Image (cartoon, rainbow, N blue to C red):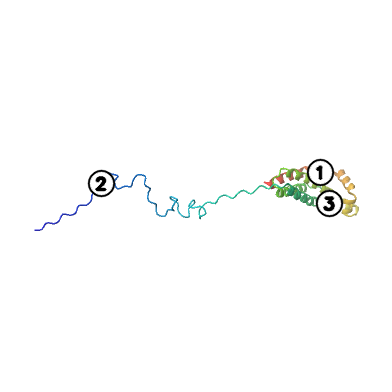
Amino acid sequence: MSQSAPSPQQPPSGPVGGNPYAGQGPAGAPYPPQQGAVSGQPGAFPGQPGAFPGQPGAFAPPAPAAPARNNLVLGVVAAVVAAMAAAALYGLVIGATKHEIGYAAVGVGFVVGLAAGKAGGRNPVLPIAAVVLALAAVYLGQLVGEAMIGAKESGLDFSDVFFNHFDLVQKAWKEEADPLTFLFFAIAGFAAFSATKKAAA
């Protein structure tokens, strides 16, 4: 009667030789790289922010700030042109209505200051220059209005009254000037100063 052959012994599944750390890698050995990780960037995946500069998902450096505008000459030239145009319009309003209108004086100062600030920027002299030009524009506009009124009453041409009888125009302005007239000067100057500051910001 034959006997069955003994089954081969299985290797022990427990620690080898009683050492619980047997079979593990040496201390300090790096873990194997994870599947899908980008080489050189642990845990970074393509398309994620910070993967590689210049690749999709990487943050671009901020654009440099634009230099502040500071051009005194250009600002003054723009303010002079605006003052001449505003004075002509202001004079037309006075000549047509025979009244000084406060809103028109505010508009004169605002237009002059806006032109100075937009063209010249943050130059500290521009607000003062805009105030002076706004006052001159209001005065010139009032003279234009007086000349238009005088031309209608005398039947003469406006150019004849304004250029050939300018002394009479100034005399008429002085006689009709009142505290409200000078208030309009102050309003125009304040509007010019404020508009220059805001336009340059």
Residue 118 lies, in percent from the top left, at: 70, 49
Q: Nearer the viewer, residue 194 or 26?
A: 26
Q: Earlier in the sequence, mark 2 or mark 3?
A: 2
Q: Earlier in the sequence, mark 1 or mark 3?
A: 3
Q: Are marks 1 and 3 in contact (CB under 8 Å)?
A: no
Q: Nearer the viewer, residue 55 or 83?
A: 55
Question: Identity of the amino acid at label 1?
Answer: Thr
Position of 18 with respect to 92 (left or right) is left
Q: CA distance from mark 2 to mark 3?
A: 113 Å
Secondary structure of the residue carrying tag 1 is helix
Indicate the quadrant containing the N terminus: top left, top right, bottom left or bottom right. bottom left
Secondary structure of the residue carrying tag 3 is helix
Residue 39 lies, in percent from the top left, at: 43, 53
Q: CA distance from mark 1 to mark 3?
A: 15 Å
Residue 104 lies, in percent from the top left, at: 77, 49
Number of the label disc, if any, that sits on residue 150: none
Q: Nearer the viewer, residue 115 or 120?
A: 120
Residue on which the image places disc 2: 16
Q: Quadrant of residue 159?
A: bottom right
Residue on which the image places disc 3: 95
Residue on which the image places disc 1: 181
